[in-house]
Amino acid sequence: MGTLAYAANQTSIKVAMKFGVWDLIWNSGAVVKFVLLILLGFSVLSWAIILSKNIQLARLDSTNLKFLDLFWKAKSLDGISEVINRYDASPLAQVFRAGYTELQRIAESSSRDKTETSALELSSLENVQRALRKASDSEVARIEGRTSFLATVGTTSPFIGLFGTVWGIMSAFQNIGNTGAASLAVVAPGISEALITTAVGLAAAIPAVVGYNHFVGKFRKQDLEINNFSADFLNIVKRNFFKG
């Protein structure tokens, strides 16, 4: 009888070991499946954001270079304004549009008040500066959009996977209690579920963290370029249109 029991036990272990990853997921409990579904959704959304943000930043760099080339070669701000719609993807072009529009308002207001038309009052320069700052903040916020989700995934996915791990271990102990045996065939499914959720949690978190850190550096570069352009535009406007 002992030999037969030992053989049966060895057979059950071999059968259990034949289960693949997909079999373990398919035969896992509802809680583990729900955890894996959440992590899978996080991973898919993270990769979608990473790919789309890379495309967006590459396009921004290209259009910024083209707009800067136009800006420094143009003979007048009016000439830039006439073709500004070609550079809608460029944050620098949007900042220019905001500053130029505010400059036009100041000029029109000065003309209506019959004040000096050859040069504007220096006190009005603050309005242009505020318009540039507001446009800059808006463009930076647009560039950074959706990347906070990557930080959320990077910080929460390991803990969600850990929850699945704890639940899988609990299932393993329940199987031991129900069967009264502590063999590998009894505890293997629950432990495997635990390891799978941990692995999927890390697989979702690692690309999200790497992607977020990568984009932080890109965002700082864009922010610096926008601030530098705003300062250059403000200096040009002050030198050519304002007095005092």
Image (cartoon, rainbow, N blue to C red):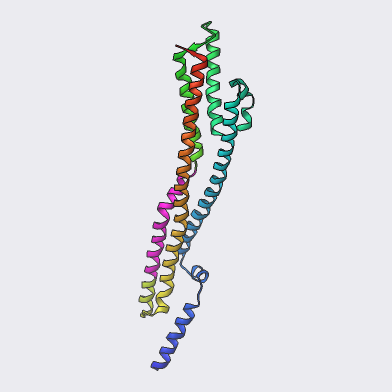
| Residue found 51% across the figure and 19% down from its top | 237
One can see residue 89 in this view: no
| Residue found 51% across the figure and 24% down from its top | 233
Q: In the rendered image, which quarter is residue 9 located in?
A: bottom left
**For this rendering, which residue is in front, 61 or 1?**
61
Q: How many marks?
A: 0
Q: Please report the bounds of the magenta region as a residue range.
A: 146-171
Residue extending farthest to the front is: 73
Residue 200 among those drawn in magenta: no
Residue 157, compared with residue 179, is above or below; it is: above
Figure quadrant of the C terminus: top left
Figure quadrant of the N terminus: bottom left
Task: Give the main secondary structure, helix, strand or loop, of the magenta stretch.
Answer: helix
Q: Position of residue 10 (x, y in %)?
A: 44, 85
Q: Position of residue 239 (x, y in %)?
A: 49, 17
One can see residue 184 in this view: yes
Q: In the drawing, does residue 95 fall left or right of residue 187? A: right
Q: Position of residue 161 (x, y in %)?
A: 42, 60
Residue extending farthest to the top is: 114
| Residue found 49% across the figure and 59% down from its top | 37
Q: Position of residue 108 (x, y in %)?
A: 56, 13
Residue 165 among those drawn in magenta: yes
